[in-house]
């Protein structure tokens, strides 16, 4: 049996050779590169997913996508049984597997060593949930995963075309005996749409949500949103643009484009008094935008969702008389200083700052009864502890409570069911946001007026070796090269409300510079001065 497995793997190594001299690492969100140089890494990831599934005795997910990257790129990431990102301790195995060349004896020896260490057998059961985005390269790459996972006798559940958050959801449901929902796409839609409908219908005086126009980045989110739009058409008017029928994936559109360039997707003429949003190529990021009466472009990013959700949840907890609930917001250093200030000083909600990358935010959010996490780029969700879910459920059924208290508890329960707790989900976040608008009678302008962003600028710097830059304190302080942080402090001190940090990118070969200051001109100047300092110190 082992002999046959080794032989099969040997054939795959010949069929999908590793390009000479190529090194790759499992970065912030898996392996990502130009799609034509990826098949060999899929061979390794099919094996890794199988081993992970055998060790956990559970289904694990493999998602083929490069999210907001250009169409010509692709990538792969693994999903752990509870729908979370692959445990960090396993990134080491991913990286080790990626270092092997196409020598079957050496690779097989390592696989056997791993199986030994992890105490699993080739014939142990393994179930892998596989899905991909709309990229042309995705189906062939998924096919390589399938072939390689079968070497170790894994069973493949093929979910074909899905958003990343949908796959996280089905993996969780499969392993959670369906207590989180049914492990199919239909189960996903049922859960979200029913919860949205319930929430609107149970809320007295809820306004019909205003029309929302969604730029779907010409990606997988388009077809999924069209389904939601049709299903909820009596309750909400969702229009989908950039649906993939004309433009290219992420090409001058999508959440990343809108957030970074702070302008609308190309070709979309914004009309006053309408609200818009953009999702990214695999539908795990969301930003809103509109044009105000002065014809200015206004954008609401991830930080805004934290504030909106925190305020809604806080209000409903108070109305339900559920006290002593530990709510927290998790941000990264990219969060606009005004949002942090508003959360702490106006809303009195504690804020934690963690390094960039969803896994860090997600992990920290587990410390709270209700942990709200968002990256400024629009990726985020809310985690609810089992304890708070039980308290809310008990409150709904508690006849000794007033009707108002029970209604608020019921609204909380429906809200929890809209949210995809496994990972940030643009579709879920959109429905949650629209429901809050309807229930709280809030307009997008009022949402924006809660606080004013400090002007900010982000730059990329190409350097000889980006690993020369090292950071601490959730990336807010640079520890190497020596004295660079002193220089940054000195520069920042010249600017009113100035703040700046630098960090090596986890997805591109660049160093990123972030700066904010009292005026846009100052933020631009500050970013530029810090860029020059980075160049000088890394020469
Ligand atoms: C990845 C991360 C995202 C992070 C971004 C930073 C996940 C699923 N995605 O897209 O959270 O903001 O990388 O990229 O973790 P950077 O390191 O190039 O700035
Ligand atoms: Zn994405």
Image (cartoon, rainbow, N blue to C red):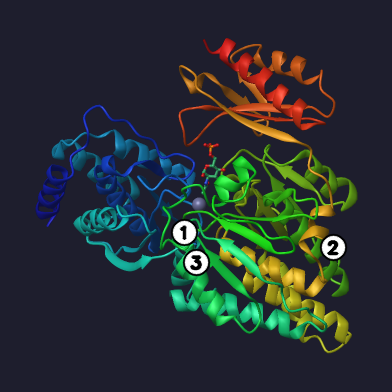
- Mark whose residue sits in front, 2 or 3: 3
The circle on residue 377 is none
First of labels 2, 3 by sequence position = 3
Tally the marks: 3
Say what secondary structure mark 1 lies in: helix
Residue designated by label 1? 164
* Mark 1 beta carbon near ligand 2 (under 8 Å): yes
Residue displayed at 87% across by 69% down:
318
How far apart marks 2 and 3 lie (CA) works out to 30 Å
Q: Earlier in the sequence, mark 1 or mark 3?
A: 1
How dense is the environment of label 1, judged by Cα within 10 Å: few (below 14), some, or many (20 and up)?
A: many
Q: Is residue 471 above or below residue 6?
A: above
State the separation of the CA atoms marked 1 and 2.
34 Å
SS for callout 3? helix
In this rendering, the answer to whether 178 lies above or below 103 is below
Decide if residue 358 is in sight here.
no
Quadrant housing the N terminus: bottom left
Name the spot of residue 222 as percent of width and height, x first.
Answer: 48, 65
Q: Which mark is residue 169?
A: 3
x and y percentages locating residue 354 in the rendered image:
66, 40
Marks 1 and 2, the one that precedes in the sequence = 1
């Amino acid at each position: 049996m082992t002999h046959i497995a080794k032989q099969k793997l040997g054939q795959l190594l010949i069929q999908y050779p590793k390009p000479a001299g190529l090194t790759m690492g499992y970065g912030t969100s898996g392996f990502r590169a130009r799609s034509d140089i990826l098949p060999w890494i899929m061979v390794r990831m099919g094996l890794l997913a199988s081993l992970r599934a055998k060790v956990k005795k559970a289904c694990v997910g493999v998602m083929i996508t490069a999210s907001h990257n250009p169409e010509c790129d692709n990538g792969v990431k693994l999903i752990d049984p509870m729908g979370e990102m692959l445990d960090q301790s396993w990134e080491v195995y991913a990286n080790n597997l990626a270092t092997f060349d196409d020598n079957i004896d050496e690779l097989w020896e390592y696989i056997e060593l791993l199986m030994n260490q992890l105490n699993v057998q080739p014939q142990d059961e393994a179930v892998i949930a596989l899905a991909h985005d709309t990229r042309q390269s995705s189906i062939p790459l998924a096919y390589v995963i399938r072939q390689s996972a079968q070497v170790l006798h894994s069973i493949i559940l093929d979910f074909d075309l899905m958003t990343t958050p949908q796959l996280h959801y089905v993996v969780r449901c499969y392993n959670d005996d369906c207590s989180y929902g049914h492990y199919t796409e239909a189960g996903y839609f049922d859960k979200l749409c029913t919860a949205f409908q319930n929430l609107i219908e149970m809320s007295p005086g809820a306004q019909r949500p205003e029309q929302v126009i969604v730029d779907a980045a010409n990606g997988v989110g388009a077809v999924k949103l069209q389904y939601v739009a049709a299903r909820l058409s009596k309750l909400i008017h969702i229009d989908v643009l950039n649906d993939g029928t004309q433009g290219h994936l992420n090409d001058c559109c999508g959440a990343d484009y809108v957030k970074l360039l702070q302008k609308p997707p190309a070709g979309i003429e914004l009309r006053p008094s309408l609200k818009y949003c953009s999702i990214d190529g695999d539908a795990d990021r969301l930003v809103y935008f509109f044009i105000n009466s002065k014809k200015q472009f206004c954008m609401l990013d991830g930080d805004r969702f934290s504030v909106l959700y925190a305020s809604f949840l806080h209000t409903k907890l108070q109305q339900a008389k559920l006290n002593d609930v530990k709510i927290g917001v998790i941000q990264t250093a990219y969060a606009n200083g005004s949002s942090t200030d508003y959360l702490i000083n106006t809303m009195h909600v504690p804020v934690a700052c963690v390094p960039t990358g969803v896994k860090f935010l997600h992990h920290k959010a587990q410390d709270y009864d209700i942990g709200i996490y968002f990256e400024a780029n629009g990726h985020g969700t809310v985690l609810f502890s089992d304890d708070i879910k039980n308290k809310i459920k008990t409150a709904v059924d508690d006849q000794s409570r007033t009707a108002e208290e029970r209604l608020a508890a019921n609204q909380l329960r429906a809200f929890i069911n809209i949210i995809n707790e496994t990972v940030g989900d643009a579709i879920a976040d959109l429905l949650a946001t629209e429901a809050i608008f309807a229930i709280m009678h809030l307009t997008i302008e009022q949402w924006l007026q809660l606080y004013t962003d400090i002007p900010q600028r982000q730059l990329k710097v190409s350097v000889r070796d980006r690993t020369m830059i090292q950071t601490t304190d959730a990336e807010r302080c640079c520890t190497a090269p020596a004295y660079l942080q002193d220089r940054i402090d000195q520069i920042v001190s010249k600017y009113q409300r100035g703040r700046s940090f630098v960090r090596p990118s986890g997805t591109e070969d660049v160093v990123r510079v972030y700066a904010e200051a009292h005026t846009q001109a100052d933020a631009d100047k500050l970013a530029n001065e810090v860029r020059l300092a980075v160049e000088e110190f890394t020469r």
